[in-house]
Image: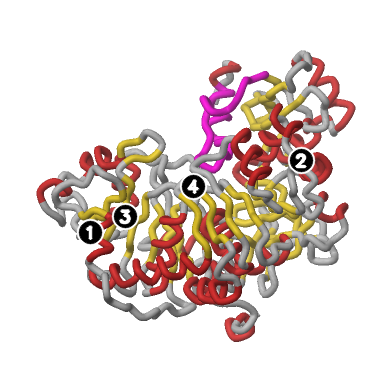
């Protein structure tokens, strides 16, 4: 689908999407969050006020502006105001520490920074002072020479920075025009993962707005629906699949500072949420929480990145009958494929997804490099309007991932069936190679989740002298269920091929101490390293 064909289907800039939502339903709540509530009409007014102040501060098209705040109306308003003048938001992960923040601000050439003084007990001003002493004496500082201004949201405002109220006063009485274009970069998204220094993915208004439109449509979002998503706004699952999906479909986004299942269940009940967004870990935390039995939920649908057994439980136990499954990555804005709320339940549970309209998917054989026939696993390649412009200021890394014909190599494994539906089989780097056989941890996990004693299972590969690698399962038991490690292994032998059966099983209370990302994803690289040490195996 060409850019011309996308035109007319939906607003292709963030300010156009906001203007449309405010015109259609000005009194519908746009955001419900710990920082307050705001309607679409009020949000449009707040964005206009911030836009005038941005222009008064000298911020304009192409400037890179950091945003380090918790989820809430203010994050959304600043993001939309920056986008409306062609400036580029650089979301800063609120779980970063000093060295990580310094890297992102420096590598992205951030010119201005909006930052909370404190968030979730973290003193961000002390952190910023440690990497940029000039906030007390004068900016720019030699440590971050590109950084010209800092706006602090909170009471602790260093001498060389500006408070939020002073920033807004500078634009009072002024009107700044909207100048955003669909092809303008809207976001530099730093990829999450286990590395300290990730790459900045350049995404445009067009790619993010269209992605939010198609995702929300396939999820079944309708005007005035209420969508619970605790996905951090500093990830594309927050900015695209939460903020922009709700904006495009004029529904309310109910969010949280951080995901906590009891609070999420309370919010979903009290706010009468019709949909929620979550990965497998988040879904299991909701499904297995003791409060769930006492909450009257009103869910109609959901967006889940989860295995079939978990999706089935979301549908049956949470009542999200229209639950859909999505697959993507930051470099694709993020969705590549998604199932649709109107499809048969069996198709949605199976995880076989249609590529987004106008997006082409190929499967490349890992050894020959040729296209795989239907049903054969290989690396997922994607081309279309959703693909990133590239990694900011990293031409070599961009060339290694994005070829001259526009094909993005995802590094993920999947297959296409004869009807063109995509099945995601796992991250290529997570695949366990057992004596020449490729084993998908996601497939083994899905089988283990059917055991009545297992609340959550996570599978990684560990070294083996004979088979090179073998599966190892870390398991959280359901409360009140007792089972031994050898029982799980014996049960697994009845349910799957021998080479897929976990050779090691270890029970854990949780994964936080071992390693989880800010979006509640388990860091399998850290878990595998932990397993090697725990089991006394050679690397």
For label 1, count other residues whose C-alpha is less than 10 Å away and answer few (under 14), some (14-19) or many (20+): few
- Which residue is the site of mark 2? 310
Q: Are marks 3 and 1 in contact (CB under 8 Å)?
A: no
Circle 4 packing at 10 Å, graded few (<14), some (14-19), many (20+), is many
| Mark toward the start of the polypeptide (1 vs 4) | 1
CA gap, disc 3 and disc 2 = 38 Å
Which mark is nearer the camera, 3 or 2? Answer: 3
- From the image, tell me which residue sits under label 3: 114
Q: Nearer the viewer, mark 3 or mark 1?
A: 1
Q: Looking at the image, tell me whether mark 2 or mark 1 is earlier in sequence order.
A: 1
Type of secondary structure dominating the magenta stretch: loop
Residue 222 % position (x, y):
70, 65
Position of residue 504 relative to residue 115, above or below, is above
Q: Determine whether 112 is above or below 451 in the image.
A: below
- Local SS, label 2: helix
Mark number for residue 54?
Answer: none
Give the x, y percent position of residue 290. Answer: 71, 27
Q: Residue at x 50, y 52 (%)?
A: 235
* 513 in magenta: yes
Q: What stretch of residues is rendered in magenta?
A: 507-532
Q: Identify the mark nearer the N-term, 3 or 1.
A: 3
Can residue 486 be spotted in the picture?
Answer: yes
Q: Which mark is residue 192?
A: 4
């Amino acid at each position: 689908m060409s850019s011309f064909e996308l035109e007319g289907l939906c607003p292709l800039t963030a300010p156009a999407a906001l203007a449309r939502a405010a015109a259609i339903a000005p009194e519908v709540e746009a955001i419900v969050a710990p920082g307050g509530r705001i309607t679409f009409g009020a949000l449009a007014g707040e964005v206009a006020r911030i836009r005038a102040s941005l222009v008064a501060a000298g911020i304009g098209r192409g400037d890179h502006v950091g945003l380090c705040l918790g989820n809430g109306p203010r994050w959304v308003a600043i993001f939309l105001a920056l986008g409306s003048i062609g400036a580029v938001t650089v979301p800063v992960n609120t779980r970063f520490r000093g060295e990580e923040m310094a890297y992102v601000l420096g590598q992205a050439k951030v010119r201005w920074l909006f930052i909370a003084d404190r968030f979730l007990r973290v003193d961000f001003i002390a952190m910023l002072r440690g990497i940029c002493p000039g906030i007390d004496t004068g900016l720019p500082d030699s440590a971050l020479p590109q950084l010209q201004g800092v706006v602090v949201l909170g009471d602790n405002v260093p001498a060389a920075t500006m408070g939020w109220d002073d920033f807004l006063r500078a634009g009072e009485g002024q009107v700044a025009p909207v100048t955003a274009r669909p092809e303008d970069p809207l976001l530099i998204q730093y990829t999450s993962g286990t590395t300290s220094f990730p790459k900045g993915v350049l995404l445009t208004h067009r790619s993010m707005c269209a992605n939010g439109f198609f995702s929300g449509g396939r999820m079944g979002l309708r005007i005035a629906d209420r969508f619970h998503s605790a996905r951090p706004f500093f990830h594309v699952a927050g900015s695209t699949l939460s903020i922009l999906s709700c904006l495009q479909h004029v529904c309310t986004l109910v969010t949280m500072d951080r995901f906590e299942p009891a609070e999420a269940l309370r919010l979903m009940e009290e706010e009468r949420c019709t949909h929620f967004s979550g990965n497998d870990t988040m879904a299991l935390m909701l499904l297995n929480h003791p409060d769930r039995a006492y909450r009257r939920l009103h869910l109609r649908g959901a967006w889940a990145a989860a295995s079939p057994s978990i999706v089935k439980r979301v549908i049956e136990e949470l009542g999200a009958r229209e639950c859909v499954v999505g697959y993507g990555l930051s470099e694709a804005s993020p969705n590549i494929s998604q199932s649709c709320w109107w499809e048969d339940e069996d198709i949605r549970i199976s995880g076989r997804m249609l590529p987004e309209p106008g997006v082409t998917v190929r499967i490349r054989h890992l050894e020959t490099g040729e296209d795989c026939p239907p049903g054969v696993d290989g690396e997922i390649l994607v081309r279309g309007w959703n693909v990133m412009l590239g990694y900011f200021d990293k031409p070599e890394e961009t060339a290694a991932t994005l070829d001259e014909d526009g094909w993005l190599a995802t590094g993920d494994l999947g297959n296409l069936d004869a009807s063109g539906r995509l099945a995601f089989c796992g991250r290529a780097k997570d695949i366990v190679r057992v004596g020449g056989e490729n084993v998908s941890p996601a497939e083994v996990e899905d089988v283990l989740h059917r055991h009545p004693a297992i609340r959550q299972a996570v599978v990684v590969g560990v070294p083996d002298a004979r088979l090179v690698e073998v599966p190892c399962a870390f398991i959280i038991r359901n409360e009140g269920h007792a089972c031994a490690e050898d029982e799980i292994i014996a049960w697994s032998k009845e349910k799957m091929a021998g080479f897929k059966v976990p050779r090691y099983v270890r029970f854990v209370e949780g994964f936080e101490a071992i390693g989880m990302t800010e979006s509640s994803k388990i860091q399998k690289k850290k878990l595998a390293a932990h397993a090697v040490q725990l089991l006394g195996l050679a690397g």
